[in-house]
C-alpha cells in the first residue's frame, strides 16, 4: 500500500542523528519535514525563474506567474473547490482565520451577534474572534466537549440561535486527534442560514478534503503541516461569501484603480492578496500536494490511522498512562501523561533519546483548563513514520518512567 522505506529516502533529515541517536520525529502536527522534490522545486524556481508575479510583461515574470497560478489550480483540485477564484493564498491557517474574522465581523456582524467555536480549538480559532469581540462587541461562544474528547453535539441546537452569525470549528483537534463530524455541523448550521468555517490545519495533511461535498463556507489550512514550505497557507471561501467580504489588507496586487478620491478593488481572489505573494512557496506547496497525491491520500490516511491505533495499543501497557482524546474516530495524534511525571520532564528526557515529541498546552489553553491539566506530551504522525519508531517511543517512555 505504502512503501515507507522508499518514502523515507525522500526526506534526508530523517536519517540524521540527535545526541548520537537516530532521530525519531513525532512532532508532525507542529510541522512536517519536507521531501526533496519540494526543496528542489523551490531551489529551481529561485535559480532559474525568479521574478515578481502578475502584470510583468517580461519572460521570467510570466513564467513565475504561470507557476503561481498553476499552484492555485493545484490547490483548487486538491480540495475540489469549484473555482480558482475561491482559493486565497495566505501565510497559513492563522492568517486565513484572521482574514475571515476581520472581514466577516466588519461586514456581517454587529454588537451582540455571536460566533460559535468549540472547546477544543487551537488559539488561532479563539483569539482571532476575541480580538473582534473586543473591537466590535461580538460574543464568542463555545460548544463543550465530553470527557472522551467528543463535541457535545446533542447540545448544539441550543447554541445555534438567531444571534449566531458564524460557526468556526476544527476538522481535527491538534490535541485530542478527534475527527469532528463537520458535515453534520455544517448541515445543522445551514438549516438555520449560518455559514461555517472549517479549520483544516490538522485534517488536510491526513485525509481527502472535498469542500463541495462538505459544503463548508470557508476552510483554512497550512502548507508546512503537509510537507510544503513554511509561510504559505490557503483560505478557501465560497465565491458568494468572498464577494460579500471587504478586503483584509490594502496594498499592491489587490486594487483595480486607485485615486485620491476612490479606490476600487481587484476581482477574486486577488482582492484578498495584498502585496507580493510568496510565489516560490505556492509552487512548493503545489509540489507537496503532487507528492502526497503520488503516494495516495487514501494510503496516507490508512497508514496513519494504523500508526495511531498501534501507538494507543502499545502505550496501554505503560503503567499509569492517561490518554487525552479517545474518540472512536481519531487521527494521527496521541496526547498523554504518565503518572505524575511533568510533561516537560518527559519530553526533555525523550529528546535525549532522540525522540522528538511536543509538550505543553499545544496552543489550546482553554482545552487544558477543561481537562484540568497544564499540558500533555503529544506524539503525532506523518506518512514517513513507522511502527518501529512507535516501539522506540514506548520503550523510551518506560525508561523515563523507571527513573521517576
Ligand atoms: N489550527 C490548528 C488545529 C492547528 O493545529 C494549528 C497549528 O498547530 C493552527 C490552526 C495554526 O496553524 P499555523 O500556525 O500554521 O497558522
Image (cartoon, rainbow, N blue to C red):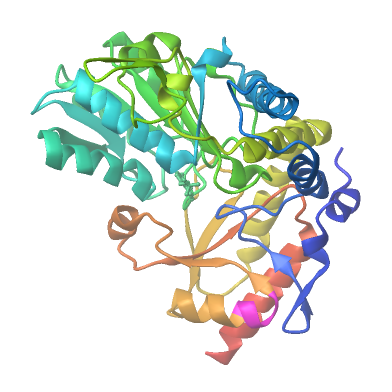
- In this rendering, the answer to whether 201 lies above or below 395 is above
**Identity of the residue drawn at 47% across and 25% down:** 253
Which image quarter is the N terminus in? top right
Above or below for 235 versus 302 = above
| Horizontal arrangement in the rendering, residue 237 relative to residue 163 (left or right) | right
Q: Residue at x 69, y 50 (%)?
A: 382
Predominant secondary structure in magenta? Answer: helix
Q: Which residues are magenta?
A: 350-354
Can residue 157 be seen in this snapshot? no
Q: Nearer the viewer, residue 157 or 316?
A: 157
- Nearest the viewer among 346 and 230 is 230
In the displayed image of the protein, which residue is found farthest to the bottom? Answer: 403
Q: In terms of image quadrants, where is residue 304?
A: top right
Q: Is residue 113 visible?
A: yes
Quarter of image, res 47: top right
Total marks shown come to 0
Image spot of residue 98 (x, y percent): 34, 37
Q: Is residue 285 left or right of residue 10?
A: left
Q: Is residue 4 magenta?
A: no
What is the x, y in percent for residue 226?
A: 64, 43
Across and down, in percent, residue 335 comes to 51, 59
* 196 on left or right of 204: left
Image point (34%, 66%), residue name = 373
Q: Is residue 116 left or right of residue 298?
A: left
Residue closer to the observer: 82 or 185: 82
Residue 346 percent across, percent down from the top left: 53, 78
Amino acid at each position: 500500500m505504502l512503501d515507507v522505506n522508499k518514502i523515507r529516502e525522500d526526506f534526508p533529515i530523517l536519517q540524521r542523528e540527535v545526541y548520537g541517536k537516530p532521530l525519531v520525529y513525532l512532532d508532525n502536527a507542529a510541522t512536517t519535514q519536507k521531501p526533496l522534490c519540494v526543496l528542489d522545486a523551490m531551489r529551481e524556481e529561485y535559480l532559474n525563474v525568479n521574478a515578481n508575479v502578475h502584470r510583468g510583461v517580461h519572460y521570467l515574470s510570466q513564467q513565475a506567474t504561470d507557476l503561481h497560478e498553476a499552484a492555485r489550480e493545484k490547490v483548487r483540485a486538491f480540495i475540489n473547490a469549484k473555482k480558482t477564484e475561491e482559493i486565497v493564498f495566505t501565510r497559513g491557517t492563522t492568517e486565513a482565520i484572521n482574514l475571515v474574522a476581520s472581514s466577516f465581523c466588519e461586514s456581517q456582524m454587529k454588537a451582540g451577534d455571536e460566533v460559535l467555536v468549540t472547546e477544543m480549538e487551537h488559539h488561532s480559532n479563539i483569539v482571532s474572534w476575541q480580538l473582534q469581540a473586543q473591537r466590535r462587541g461580538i460574543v464568542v461562544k463555545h460548544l463543550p466537549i465530553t470527557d472522551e474528547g467528543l463535541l457535545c453535539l446533542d447540545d448544539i441546537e441550543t447554541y445555534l440561535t438567531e444571534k449566531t452569525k458564524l460557526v468556526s470549528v476544527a476538522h481535527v483537534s491538534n490535541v485530542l486527534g478527534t475527527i469532528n463530524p463537520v458535515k453534520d455541523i455544517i448541515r445543522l448550521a445551514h438549516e438555520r442560514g449560518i455559514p461555517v468555517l472549517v479549520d483544516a490545519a490538522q485534517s488536510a495533511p491526513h485525509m481527502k478534503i472535498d469542500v463541495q461535498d462538505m459544503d463548508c463556507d470557508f476552510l483554512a489550512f497550512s502548507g508546512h503541516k503537509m510537507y510544503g514550505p513554511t509561510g504559505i497557507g490557503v483560505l478557501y471561501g465560497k465565491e458568494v461569501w468572498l464577494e460579500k467580504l471587504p478586503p483584509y489588507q490594502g496594498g499592491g496586487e489587490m486594487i483595480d484603480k486607485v485615486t485620491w478620491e476612490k479606490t476600487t478593488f481587484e476581482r477574486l481572489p486577488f482582492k484578498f492578496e495584498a502585496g507580493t505573494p510568496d510565489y516560490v512557496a505556492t509552487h512548493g506547496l503545489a509540489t507537496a500536494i503532487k507528492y502526497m497525491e503520488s503516494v495516495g491520500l487514501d494510503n496516507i490516511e490508512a497508514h496513519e490511522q494504523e500508526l495511531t491505533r498501534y501507538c494507543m495499543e502499545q502505550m496501554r501497557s505503560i503503567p499509569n498512562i492517561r490518554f487525552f482524546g479517545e474518540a472512536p474516530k481519531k487521527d494521527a495524534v496521541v496526547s498523554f501523561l504518565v503518572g505524575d511525571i511533568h510533561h516537560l520532564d518527559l519530553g526533555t528526557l525523550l529528546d535525549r533519546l532522540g525522540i522528538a515529541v511536543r509538550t505543553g498546552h499545544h496552543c489550546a489553553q482553554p482545552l487544558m483548563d477543561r481537562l484540568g491539566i497544564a499540558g500533555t506530551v503529544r506524539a503525532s504522525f506523518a506518512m514517513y513514520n513507522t511502527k518501529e519508531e512507535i516501539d522506540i517511543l514506548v520503550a523510551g517512555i518506560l525508561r523515563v518512567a523507571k527513573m521517576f
